[in-house]
Image (tube, helix red, strand yellow):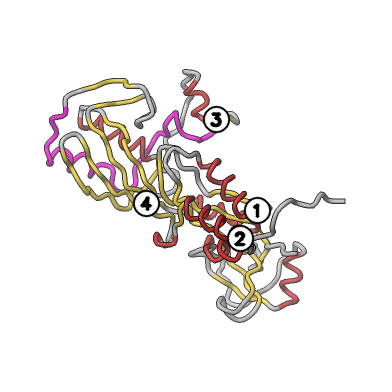
Amino acid sequence: MAKRRKGRAINGVLLLDKPYEMSSNNALQRVKHIYFAQKAGHTGALDPLATGMLPICLGEGTKFSQFLLDTDKTYVVTAKLGVRTTTSDADGDIVSEKEVAVSQDELDKALDSFRGTTQQIPSMYSALKYQGQPLYKYAREGIEVPRESRAITVFNLEQLRFEGDEVDLSIHVSKGTYIRTIVDDLGELLGCGAHVAHLRRTAVGNYPNDKMVTMEQLETLLEKAQAEEIPPSEYLDKLLLPMTSACDGIPAVFVDDMSAHYLRHGNPVQAANTPTEGMVQVFVGDNEAEGEFIGVGQIDDEGRVAPKRIVVLP
């Protein structure tokens, strides 16, 4: 007999405004505890020194977290010029210090070299894995391991402020882009070195910035519910976005109850108006607004919708 999971079978996505100096995993565990959720997972870690949008998927929503890992993201970063560090952020040891004598023209030229698609070598202090271990574990032991460069795209890079030895930038980038590496490379181009002084993620995909909630707001609502002796879900669940929000941009197809039954049992089905390839969101009914979301399918070689990530509800 399967062991019953502890917690509520609550499904959805919470847009957490991750606080400073808290790891993404600690933030995840606190949210899971506050919601008393059976399952929870985040969608791309933020460094402890970074703040901002950290989508946390609850319950069946965890099945769709990969789509958020693969989406583009936007950051606001403060680059401190003149000081290069081992980790390319304020937490590292100082490698070098140089005088800052950078003109606006020099900065403009350097920034322009990052726009568009370029190659980037991941930082040794990233969570990217090598032989099953994250790179930062090797870095902390003083071990340098080989890393392959990979293509990244900077969709938009805007200078917000340039005062003395500080530059504020807004950067919209593709998945897998390391902002600390961009800042370190910028410092090297300018000949003075640089590191990340402050970093905030302002957007993940098309999620609305104004839907972010802080840890303090969640804890306040939990305490309020406990004081009023009502289920915390009455306040907390209203903050959740639907699971489908993690699948933004994936086309939708609609099936009947019988086809939904086959999909839930692992069988591909025919559906009207399916694309020729790729993934689709699957709804039971005639439209997204009123239909039941049952998961994501993959178009197979015969043009059928094959189950890929299917929602299992009690």
- Looking at the rendered structure, the kind of residue marked 2 is Pro
Horizontal arrangement in the rendering, residue 185 relative to residue 292 (left or right)? left
Disc 2 vs disc 3: Cβ atoms closer than 8 Å?
Answer: no
Circle 1 sits in a helix, a strand or a loop, which is it? loop
Horizontal arrangement in the rendering, residue 4 relative to residue 113 (left or right)? right
Disc 4 vs disc 3: Cβ atoms closer than 8 Å?
Answer: no
Mark 2 or mark 4, whichever is nearer to me: 2
Horizontal arrangement in the rendering, residue 153 relative to residue 83 (left or right)? right
Mark 1 or mark 3, whichever is nearer to me: 1
Where residue 156 sits: x, y (%)? 29, 52
Q: Identify which residue, 231 or 36, lies in the foreground.
A: 231
User: Mark 2 vs mark 4: which is more N-terminal?
Assistant: 4
| Residue matched to label 3 | 130
Residue 166, above or below 76 = above
Mark 2 or mark 3, whichever is nearer to me: 2
- For the residue carrying disc 2, how many other residues have a C-alpha within 10 Å: few (<14), some (14-19), or many (20+)? some
| Image mark count | 4
| Residue matched to label 2 | 232
User: Mark 1 vs mark 3: which is more N-terminal?
Assistant: 1
Q: Residue furthest bottom?
A: 286
Circle 2 sits in a helix, a strand or a loop, which is it? loop
Disc 2 vs disc 1: Cβ atoms closer than 8 Å?
Answer: yes
Q: CA distance from mark 1 to mark 3?
A: 34 Å
Residue depicted at 72% across the width and 62% down the height: 312
